Image: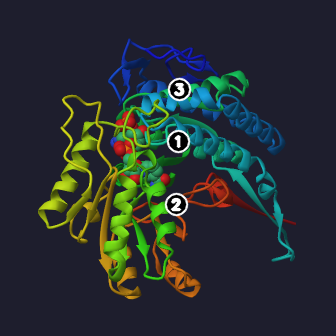
Amino acid sequence: MIESPLLPNLTGYLAGRWAESLGGATLAVVSPANGELLGRVSAAGGEQAASAVEAAASVLARPAPPAQRQVWLLAIHDALLANQAELARIITLENGKPLKESVAEVEYAAGFFGFFATQLDHLAPRALPDRIRGCHWTVHQRPAGVAALITPWNFPLAMLAKKLSAALAAGCSVVTKPASATPLSAIALWTLLDRLALPAGLANLVIGPAGPLSEVFCGHPAVRIVSFTGSTEVGQRLAQQAAPHFKRLALELGGNAPFLVFEDADLEAAVAALIANKFRAGGQTCVCTNRVLVQVGIVGRFAERVAERVARLKVGDGLDPATDIGPLINRDGFDKVAAHVANALAGGARRLAGGDPPRPAQAWGAFYPPTVLVGVEPSMQVCAEETFGPVIAIGGFNDEAEAVRLANGTPYGLAAYLFTRDAERANRVAARLRFGHVGVNTGTGPTPEAPFGGMKRSGYGREGGLEGLLEFCEPQAIAAV
Ligand code: NAP
């Protein structure tokens, strides 16, 4: 069992207090590395979710001014950084990712609170310069209302931080549901919030099976926005559930990121960027490269350099400082990766690195070796679907037009990367890529300061940047005589 000063209670947080256990239902949190039971968290159902929404709605009757919200945001930012090491340990224990990545995740999470603390001036009312229709006009950014936040397991702290920071900055109150596999990071964050003595009901945490909780979030009239990060399938379901109530939705869904390498690219830089981008969280991020497309003249050379680098990566327990790649979240994740690799090999792809690891006998311990495949085709599962694992799948293209066509040949549109020394080509190709985030000569992912989100089946809405703040606001125009 996990012992941590940040986990004094393994339960949710409602109306300014730790939630009481209801009927003894619990959720077991298990280390993906070794199966150790980390804790049993009391599970909430629909009734607790409704109480949380009502607590959140009641606090909106006494809105906090922007200056107060700024104080809270900065205090949360500082509390996260002051507890960075312990938060990182909790992330690694429940998610499995290498400790160095968890340390970076805490800093990334804190960055959203720090950034939004600097953005509140943008919410000041805007007066229109002209008297129109005989009236003075002002545009106000009002808080959208109660915000329901649903987050996945791959960044147990950062995904939550992105939403919570923007919602609080906008003046919303929140009800949050973290992934059932990784609720401990959320509880640790709420321990820090509890110490800050925020108004009761401002930030509520409900942990439990998704179905009954999301039914409340989508159906309760007080919830005005549902912000979700996770799979496209669940995003679709939420859109259907929320449609009759005209709730706003922000959906950060799955991706299928292409990584284009043109013949004139700096190959060493492209290889290094690919390795850093691809193996973050063991390949289980929505912005991880899924398809590498290399101009035909350099495919062989590029693939060999990648395979050499990949052979040096160490797979193991995330708590071991030497580990580069931790376990996949569970055996289902392992099965998907193994099936994609088998499908590619059966279709004629060659494996330059990796192997056939034994299928774990239980849900945990899903270690998969970093794998490099060359000669993949767009129709193979490894290209057509999001693999969500440590597999680099390399295919080819002949010219710029084909590169753009192949890159856009997916229903997803979250992140894309391109490498070329030709600045004009970079601008031309970036403008034609239907992805919300494009890296030019870099594999860098999102940052608090810039809007991040998807096109097409990767969802709508943005997180980070001013756009991420406005997601939680509703504009109101006032015409006054
Ligand atoms: P998931 O199954 O969709 O789960 C995400 C969250 O949704 C969890 O909290 C989950 O709760 C909840 N959920 C499950 N079923 C639900 C339902 N019927 N109604 C409401 N909520 C429900 O996704 P995942 O497997 O955890 O995450 C991987 C996916 O997320 C990938 O496709 C990845 O690309 C995407 N992702 C996208 C971004 C982005 O920014 N676009 C970032 C990270 C990940 P339980 O855990 O209780 O089931």
Residue 19 placement (x, y as % from top left): 53, 18
Quadrant occupied by the N terminus:
top left
293, 25: nearer the viewer: 293
Residue 246 seen: no
SS label for mark 3 = helix
Position of 146 relative to 208 (above/below): below
Residue 371 placement (x, y as % from top left): 29, 53
Residue 334 placement (x, y as % from top left): 26, 43
SS label for mark 1 = helix
First in sequence: mark 2 or mark 1?
A: 1
Where on the picture, by quarter, is residue 32? top left
Q: Which mark is residue 101?
A: 1
Question: Between marks 3 and 2, how big is the CA–CA gap?
Answer: 31 Å
First in sequence: mark 3 or mark 2?
A: 3
Tell me if label 1 and label 3 are in contact, CB under 8 Å.
Answer: no
Question: Between marks 2 and 1, how big is the CA–CA gap?
Answer: 22 Å
Give the residue at mark 3.
51
Ligand 1 found in image quarter: top left
Give the residue at mark 2.
453
**Crowding near pointer 3: few (<14 within 10 Å), some, many (20+)?**
some
Position of 24 relative to 206 (above/below): above
Question: Between marks 1 and 3, how big is the CA–CA gap?
Answer: 36 Å
369, 379: nearer the viewer: 369
Position of 143 relative to 195 (above/below): below
First in sequence: mark 1 or mark 3?
A: 3
Q: Which mark is residue 20?
A: none
Residue occupying the point 58% across, 83% down: 423
Tell me if label 2 and label 1 are in contact, CB under 8 Å.
Answer: no
Mark nearer the viewer, 1 or 3: 1
Residue 294 placement (x, y as % from top left): 37, 75
Residue occupying the point 80% across, 45% down: 66
